[in-house]
Amino acid sequence: MIAVLILLIFVSSVNTQSCTYDELTLDDGATHTDKSACKEITCSGGETSEKFIGCLIEGVCLPFGEYKNDIETCKKTTCLQKGNGYTFNTTLYGCTDSNDVCHPGGTTWEWNTCFTIGCRVTSEHTAEEYLVKAGCLYNGKCMDIGQPFKSSKSDCLTYECTETNKTYGLKLVDEKCKINGTCYDLGQEFEVDCFKYKCSKVDGNHTAELVDSGCSVNGQCKPSGQTWTEECTKYTCDKGTTDVLEQQCKSGDKCYTEGESWTEGDYKYTCSINETHSKISGVKVSSATGVCTHNGIDRKVGEIWKENCFTMTCNQNYSMALPDGCQVQSESCMPVGQTKYSVAITDIKCNYQNGETDECVDDGWKTKEGCAIKTCKVDKDTNSWKFESSLQCRWKDECVPEGEIRLVKSCMQYQCEIFKKHGKDTSQMKKKGKIGCSIKGGELLKIDNSETKNLNGCVGEGSYFKIHKRKKCAVFKCNLKGKNKWKTEKLKTYEITDLQTLINGNINC
């Protein structure tokens, strides 16, 4: 009986033996998972047994069958059980770009704005990149292949993105000249402000080449070679210059040639033309006999009246002693016993015909007819008046006095000249040469030569200016290249820096 009891106690003590693992006590039959070692610990009969439950990677337990992706190398590591231990299976799962960034297979990414790259895994150990989409980079935007678009410098230039042997570039497919906001085809002729131009390409630049020049007259364009008559003067257009072919005197609605005379009422007029003027002189016809009889009207002695801008009086102070008589009564021959009284002129003005209205104007009064200035001239010694005309030059819609200068947008200056041609006065705006560089739309920065000035958007040699266009800015210098040949040269970055130091300020360009 005692022996049986001792045996039972021994067996019981054996079946309840525990285990110790890493300072941890495990009951008999208990298990413990140690993730730091990636193992499972089992206590049996006082002894521990170990088995791997996964792979230990850099201190981390990766269970069997699971994997880990390395985004730096684009490699996929899978944990596999091998016998009582483990092993790794490493394969590629994507592509690594030039920036060492991993892109999984089947994904795409952008490179250099205009290129889309894709990744495909071809085997366990190889992966390759392929081109999904490509284009041309222009002003920060991507243009598709075959897509036409307008140039940022001019909407008259059209480019297209092309590809040749995997090389991508821009091709100019349509080029035109842009003048005053309008596009013109190469070779096309067009007119602007009475000038005929042709769209041409010179040294790679699109420009308007001057073909012919007309004449602007009262807002109308006269082609070169055309003749016309205005205010009794015959003109012709000679390549932008208005020449006088023939000049006559105008009275009312009639024209009179040089030396021609005509009578209106009690006045006789004569047309005379000198080197620069045409003029009409008027002389009073002698009065009638006896008392003052004028235009069939008897005027009493002392009576005052006005007629055709003349103030007249019948005054006995102007009586004339006559012969004893004449057989034939005439202007200077009176019957015996009669007294001749003359009509005295006390005031003289010029008779100016303004349309259908006659106006009496004072000596020195001026008016403009076309590009001729008519001036009233009164001669009290001869009791006559006349209109003298002085010629000026036509320039667009204005008349320019002799010697005055006008500028065009290109800084070319023209001067009014009056000269004789075919014996007649001729006016011409003659080209005198450029005075500098145009800075239209720009801002003057500095003038090196103190003798040059900023005149109507034109600056001389050594001047610096900047131009903003389409959010871009450039700095230029005006230089004289030979006689009247001006050129604007764009400054480089280091030259702009030197200029800022020179003017002691920021150009902000």
Image (cartoon, rainbow, N blue to C red):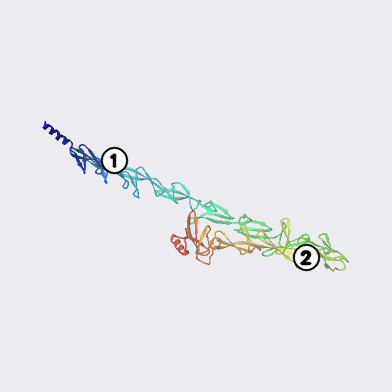
Kind of residue at badge 2 = Thr
Residue 479 in view, yes or no: no
Kind of residue at badge 1 = Glu
- Helix, strand or loop under label 1: loop
User: Residue 50: x, y in percent?
Assistant: 21, 40
Q: Quadrant of residue 209?
A: bottom right
Q: Is residue 94 above or below residue 279?
A: above
Residue, x 67% and y 57% (percent of image)?
A: 229
Q: In this rendering, would 60 be left or right of 154?
A: left
Label 2 crowding class (10 Å Cα cut-off): few <14, some 14-19, many 20+? few
Q: Is residue 341 above or below residue 226?
A: below
Q: Quadrant of residue 370?
A: bottom right
Q: Quadrant of the N terminus?
A: top left
Q: In this rendering, would 411 be left or right of 418?
A: left
Residue, x 73% and y 56% (percent of image)?
A: 357
Return the residue found at the far right.
Answer: 337
The residue that label 1 is drawn on is 66
The residue that label 2 is drawn on is 346
User: Residue 212: x, y in percent?
Assistant: 57, 56
- Helix, strand or loop under label 2: strand
